Image (tube, coloured by chain):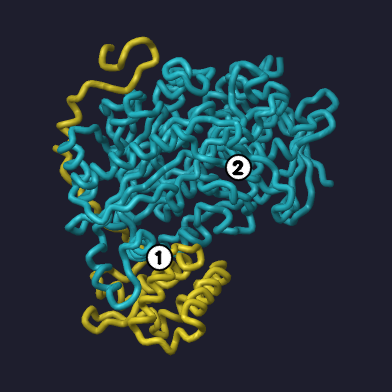
Amino acid sequence: MAGHEKVDVLIIGSGASGAAVAWSLAETRMRILCLEQGDWIKSTDFPANRRDWEARRYTDFDILPNRRGRATDYPVNDDNSLMKIANFNGVGGGTVIYTAHWPRMHPSDFRVKSLDGVADDWPIDYWALERFYEENDRMMGASGLAGDPGVPPRHPPMPPIPLGKTGTRYAQAMNRLGWHWWPSDTTVATAEYEGRSRCINLGHCTPGCAQGAKASTDITYWPLAIRAGVELRTRCRVREITTDERGMAAGAIYYDGEGREQFQPAEVVIVACNGVGTPRLLLNSASARFPNGLANSSGLVGKNLMLHPWPIVSGYVDEPLDGGRGPITSLWSKEFYETDRARGFVRGYTLQFGRGTGPANQAIMGAAAGHLPWGRDHHRVYRELIDRRVNIGVACEDLPEEHNRVTLDRVLKDSHGIPAPKIDYTISENSHRMMEHGIARAEEILTAAGATRLYCSRTALNYPGHLLGTARMGTDPERSVVNEWGRCHDVKNLFIVDGSIWVTSGGVNPTSTIQALALYVADQMKQRLANLFD
Amino acid sequence: MVPADGAWGVPGADDAAILSDIVQSLGHDVPLVRQALGEIAAKAGGAFATLDRDRREKLINEAYAGRSAAMVALGRVVVAAYYRDDRVLMALKFEPRPPFPEGYALEQGDWSLLDAVRNRPPFWRDDRGTSAGER
């Protein structure tokens, strides 16, 4: 096995959190190395460059690794979960293929036990993260509109995405109902920003942005981190984190691009593989000293997986709207976000209003919903549907339950022989009630918007891929994996900075909070450099 | 599944160029598409091609209604190739080109609609003892 010179900080994973923590720690002038199992993605690689751009959402730019099947992916056994696991293995991680929706958690999300008597409070609160949210908004380049009465104050540096015909139609319906709406915050550049070109409306943002208008960490944090001296090594798949005789992390064993086993020693190891990759790695790092997996004396590594149930209600209006000629993100509504027990459940959800898609995906979705027939009627009906689709996603808070978990599959392995993650996940009764409430409200809204042919997908294809909670933070080592600043209770030079440290999930897309947390942990580390391992 | 239609001025998915595109783009969907074709053939008692048009369409729609992964994959690969064909897109008044580099225009829409929301007091729940609206 080849060896390497010891680094001060080894970061595993270059996605949302790994990039943020690398950039933040770079100012310390420590020697920092990041290992990434995927490749750099070039702007010319993205689907919007080619005529088959819509089909590639289901092939090499699918959000599901099991369908995508790139050489850099690992398989996931999610047969025992209605919701499928999404990720991307490449520089930038999931930010390459996210939708760029940019809500923050709410203050109440960090206090669910105190306020609503469920799950646990976080050991930190919204206000501890607020300045890191702001810093991250500047780094990623957020677009949005200040003044939203549904969320705490924030200051997006760019204006929001245009309402367009679709957003206008939704807004009219929401005003008719008297319910809150606001243009969604996104990380789509609506103006030239820090070397990024502005959005030119290439369609659905999820499968990557050929224009470079969508913020992904390969074009935001990483160029700055690398310029500041951080090394990023691609095609390096980490198998396990090793420990020394004192029980401290010694480094990582990984396979390089040629499949050769390598060992990278480090003073500090930071895991940034998100809610499935991180527990997989920790569980696969079991040893005589840590027989149940690394940092797992609590037994909670892999448990409390939260995936965000996300029903989508769609319909068709009587006039052509924007179709796929704009970002899919449009509006959000916080009308039903905060707990109201009269609704029959605790916690709440964000309503997310989507724009349409391109001509092929409109046919795919029309057929899947049973609206678009095959045969001689196909063309007539297609012309009734084209560019008229409206849809609302119900982003439900998923509360932690220990039986929802990631373990190591005993049979399925990746191309290097590393056990694949196995997912066991069910949707809770509280979530079911929340979903049905949200579906009914979405149907009201679409009806108010004049939509007909309503259709609901309760576990929607391709949504959402949020992987949270499997190495939760807390002050009690028996009830958490990392402490209130991301350090593992069991291994004092091992940190986790990704979505796995979340205590609860909120009802929002997580990337903004994942990165704010990573910046927060990095800041805590910088403040404690002299006694980081005490 | 998607027949030619002179009235709409479109070829069918069985057009040689489109069918070739479908076949070339199957990729990892080959097993599912094979399975779907097998399901259709089985429903037709092995005589799908000999059925009349009405019965073929009815059979395919019935098979698709079950939403099996195989049938959904078959439908997806057919329309993904069909709705990128120049003739089809031009008949629909779409430009036959990839989105990049030209992009598209997205109108601003009616921002005055937001006035109804702007004046609403803050209603997010503040965990610091007072509601946001009271601070």
What amino acid type is highlighted by mark number 2?
Asp
- Which chain does the numbered disc 1 sit on? B
Q: Residue at x 48, y 60 (%)?
A: A58
Dot 1 and dot 2 within a common chain: no
- Which chain does the numbered disc 2 sit on? A
Q: Residue at x 31, y 82 (%)?
A: B4
Sort mark 1 into few (<14), some (14-19) or many (20+) by Cα contacts within 10 Å. some
Task: Provide the secondary structure element on which disc 1 rests.
Answer: helix
What amino acid type is highlighted by mark number 1?
Ala
Query: How far is mark 1 from mark 2, CA to CA?
Result: 29 Å
Between A316 and A74, the one nearer to me in the picture: A316
Sort mark 2 into few (<14), some (14-19) or many (20+) by Cα contacts within 10 Å. some
Q: Does the rendering let one see residue A355?
A: no
Q: Which residue is mark 2?
A: A424
Q: Is residue A390 above or below residue A351?
A: below
User: Can you give x and y, in whole percent of width and height, for residue A299 in the image?
Assistant: 69, 28
Q: Can you tell which chain is drawn yellow?
A: B
State the mark number for residue B65.
Answer: 1
Left or right: B113 as drawn, with respect to A154: left
Q: Colour of chain A?
A: cyan
User: Can you give x and y, in whole percent of width and height, for residue A269 in the image?
Assistant: 69, 31
Q: Residue at x 78, y 46 (%)?
A: A262
